[in-house]
Image (tube, grey):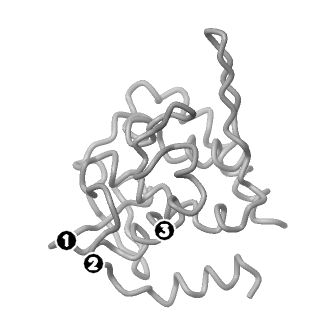
Amino acid sequence: MSVRIVISALALTLLPLASSNLAQAQDSAEKAKVVTEENGKYFDAEGNPTYKIENGTVDWYTFSGYRRYHSDCHVCHGPDGTGSTYAPALVNSLKTMDYATFLSIVAEGRKNVGGGKENVMPAFGDNKNVYCYMDDLYVYLRARADGAAPRGRPPKKADKPQAAKDAEASCMGG
């Protein structure tokens, strides 16, 4: 079974729960606080991936998210998630968008039509350079939205955990 199908199924399963709570899904540094760690990956109290930034050093997944964002997302959404005339500022969107909704939109895309304007977010569920790193993208954008990560390349990063190396090799087919 392809990763895209698994991610899409998970996102679509969680989407009804997410959309019913979307209005109250205001994220914050407090909600993003690390509660558990598993092989160098951090999670909040709800089990969503989150960032860990200490003394100017970002965790590997936040750094990886920065790199992946600037590889595939910044062309439309602007540098550091600040938006453009073409696509919204994700640093604002992630303040009220939960994890399941983020996964769904990135994997399946979406189309907004209104006010005589059409905005289309393409589906990235077939792009391994995106879907293999969706948690990383979420973590980076969450850190930016919460104000924990400043604009620009993080000056210091944690080493890449073996679990990240293994997941990357598995997902990328190597």
Q: Where's residue 135, x and y in %?
A: 52, 62
In the image: residue 139, left or right of residue 147 = right
Q: Name which residue lies at 44% across and 64% down.
A: 66
- Residue pointed to by mark 3: 67
Marker count (numbered): 3
Residue 56 falls in image quadrant: bottom left
Task: Look at the numbered disc 1 and give the secondary structure of its residue.
Answer: loop
- Residue pointed to by mark 1: 56
On screen, 122 above or below 34?
above
> What's under tag 3, amino acid-wise?
Arg
| Mark nearer the N terminus (2 vs 1) | 1
Q: Quadrant of the C terminus?
A: bottom right
Q: Where's residue 63, x and y in %?
A: 40, 71
> What's under tag 2, amino acid-wise?
Lys
Residue 112 falls in image quadrant: top right
- Which numbered dot is residue 126? none
On screen, 84 above or below 151?
above
Q: Where's residue 100, x and y in %?
A: 56, 45
In the image: residue 137, left or right of residue 118 = left
Q: Residue at the top extreme?
A: 115
Q: Quadrant of the N terminus?
A: bottom right
Residue 95 falls in image quadrant: top left
Could you tell me how far apart the alpha carbons at marks 2 and 3 are, in whole angstroms? 13 Å
- Report if the CB atoms under discs 1 and 3 are less than 8 Å apart: no
- Report if the CB atoms under discs 2 and 1 are less than 8 Å apart: yes
> What's under tag 1, amino acid-wise?
Gly
- Residue pointed to by mark 2: 156
Q: Name which residue lies at 68% across and 18% down.
A: 113
Q: Residue at the left extreme?
A: 55
Label 1, residues with CA under 10 Å away: few <14, some 14-19, many ≥20: some
| Mark nearer the N terminus (2 vs 3) | 3
Task: Look at the numbered disc 3 and give the secondary structure of its residue.
Answer: helix
